Amino acid sequence: MLPVVVVHGGAGYIPKERSELSISGVCSAVQAGYTILQGEGSSMDAVVEAVIQMENNPAFNAGCGSVLNIKGEVEMDALVMDGKTLGSGAVSAVRNIANPIQLARLVMDKTSHACLTAEGASQFARSMGIPEVPLESLITEYSRMRWKKNLAPDANPVECQMLGTVGAVAVDKEGNIACATSTGGMLNKMEGRVGDTPIIGSGGYADNLLGAVSTTGHGETIMKITLARLILFHMEQGQSAEAASDLGLAYMKSRLEGLGGVVTVDPQGHWAARFSSNYMAWAAAQEDTLHYGLYTGEHFTQKA
Ligand code: ASP
């Protein structure tokens, strides 16, 4: 069954003309993660590489392509968690770096803290030799267009639902489990707003004894129910990765009318990509097979 890597490219509404970009983006990211798992790489190496690929892909709301805050700037959140040690690293409201997930991993590996924010995170990035990139290099024409549209008092709420946060979970040959999640957050958010993504238990969680989850959806809602940890709680109670994911998402919907999506793995390498939103681009690679889909019920396979 082992190893496996599963990624998502964000829950929400994806306009038809952008669906191909999302699908090809998640498929190439999962392939990159899977190549690492087939070599000597760990699940942590695999999830970080898969997320870097999507941060570098302007189709997603992470790294280049992040949504803009109310001032038209980019502030990003990211989280990694290592299921072997329960170590985690996160950055929040970080600016001017291309790959927040890399910085989150450095917070885990090189500091005694779990999360660095804003200017402190930037200072740490500098001290680690991570180059600063201009704000403009993270902004796409598309994100600027959406920002402008959503400044209008009669903004279309459907546009606001196009999210595109990215995440990955993996189990490697040794049975070690990891998760990674990265986002530009919510469209036209207040300056300094931090969502669920960098919060362990909400944006993601990994424990070798239980499994791992990476989440996407409205952050303020996800945090209220600590979605990632809630799903792992259900797995602890004997539910499968798929049933536990559905239970967590169903609770968020019934309790708070919140929609979202998750990718989940268990310690044996069973996996699930589940969502209550209309769409979530996702892909998984296991036993030389690539699985992917976008709409509810869609599941294509091809050789990985
Ligand atoms: N959860 C992210 C946030 O609230 C958004 C998303 O998943 O698209 O920042």
Image (cartoon, rainbow, N blue to C red):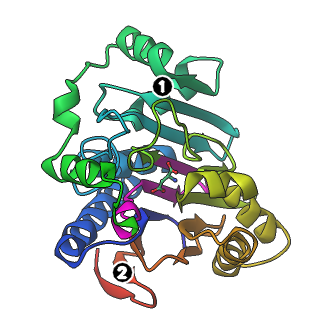
Q: Which region of the structure is painted magenta?
A: 158-181
Q: Position of residue 180 (x, y in %)?
A: 50, 48
Callout 2 secondary element: strand
Q: Which residue is mark 2?
A: 293
Residue type highlighted by circle 1: Leu
Residue type highlighted by circle 2: Gly
Q: Quadrant of residue 188?
A: top left
Tell me the residue at 23%/28% (across/down).
135
Q: Is residue 33 above or below residue 192?
A: below
Callout 1 secondary element: helix
Tell me the residue at 46%/56% (across/down).
168
Q: Is residue 221 left or right of residue 144?
A: right
For the residue pair 136 and 102, the one nearer the viewer reads as 136
Camera sees residue 114: yes
Q: Point out the image quarter for the N terminus.
A: bottom right
Q: Is residue 10 above or below residue 283?
A: above
Q: Is residue 258 left or right of residue 217?
A: right
Q: Which residue is mark 1?
A: 106
Tell me the residue at 61%/57% (across/down).
175
